[in-house]
Image (cartoon, rainbow, N blue to C red):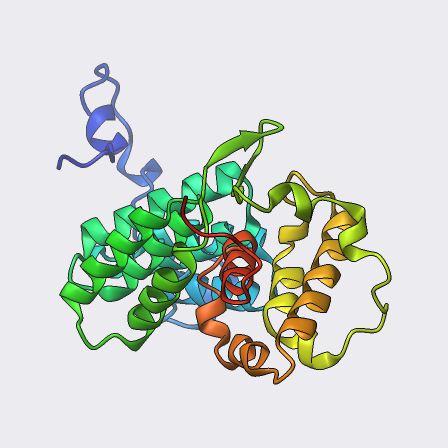
Amino acid sequence: MASDWVSFNDASSSCGNSVVAPEDQTTKEEAPRGEAELDDPDYLPPPPDAAPNWKDVQAQGDTAAAAGDNEAATRHFTAALQTCPAESAAGLHARRSAVLLAKGGRDGIAQALRDAVRCVELQPEWSGGHLSTARAWIAAGHIGKAMTAVERGLAADPLSEELKRVREVLRKGGAGVKPKARKQEGEKVVVEHRDNRQEMAQPHVAAGIDESMSDGLMSGTFRWAANKKFFQMPPFPKKEGVELMRGWGKLLASRDPTGKMIQCAQSDSSLLDCLTFPVTVGFWAQQLGLLRCGG
């Protein structure tokens, strides 16, 4: 590539016929120097400001993501993608996909899916890219496509325990959920449950629930859903969503006196991170006979 630099000394030599006296010429070696240069004959000027190392920027994104600052994490991962080597881009796309999913919203889910797909394109043999794609499809309400992504990931890495766990959850939960992706209020993607969605929205479901639920209930599916702010997804405002989850907690406790399913819900947070709130509720409700399947 040709240099953009122009030698003005060379260019000026052809301009006109004026003669400059030798004593008036200032060469590069004779240019006035600063005090630091005069004091130190070995002085070298500082190099131009270097761009931040992409690994440092990625680390800043990881820190922001761990703190729940998804906006900052997205900015850092985007900046790191501008300068990282090609072989490291897939991991950054996966990271950005995860924080975009955590941000939520229709646009966030769509962008997360694009990042996940790009990750798979760059490194098709890396199971992490297929896992990112599965999570994005789940968030969009496409359980079948999520399962396809999981199977492709397992084909690339048959020993991936995380992909196996997600596959098991999808097999159990997918049978009881009839997902239908649709736009709601022009900004979110929601998952509807065919047989019980009307009942879930009724205020009486949450009536009479004790305000102080046990830590045992809240530390599993319910606390996860609260932290992920899925209660703010349409059609439920936040307040109604909190009341609704209390209602589900009451039903789970009454139908599962041994606490076996609640214990299972608490046992693997990485598994729960793969699911949106509606799919999670659909799975546990189906296991407890609260959803009618088929027909």
With respect to residue 32, does 208 lie above or below? below
Task: Say which quadrant the C terminus sits in.
Answer: top left
Q: Is residue 102 left or right of residue 93?
A: right
Residue 3, by quadrant, is top left
The number of numbered badges drawn on the structure is 0
Residue 149, by quadrant, is bottom left
Residue 4, by quadrant, is top left
Residue 52 is at least partly visible in this image:
yes
- Of residues 31 and 78, which is closer to you in this image? 78
Picture coordinates of residue 282, whole percent (x, y):
52, 56
Residue at the front extreme of this rendering? 295
Residue 44 is at least partly visible in this image:
no
Residue drawn 42% across the image and 49% down it: 78
Residue drawn 37% across the image and 71% down it: 41
Residue drawn 77% across the image and 48% down it: 240
Residue at the top extreme of this rendering? 16
Task: Say which quadrant the N terminus sits in.
Answer: top left
Residue drawn 29% across the image and 55% down it: 147
Picture coordinates of residue 10, whole percent (x, y):
19, 30
- Of residues 137 and 2, which is closer to you in this image? 137
Picture coordinates of residue 278, whole percent (x, y):
55, 52
- Of residues 212 and 118, which is closer to you in this image? 212
Residue at the bottom extreme of this rendering? 258
Picture coordinates of residue 91, whole percent (x, y):
31, 61
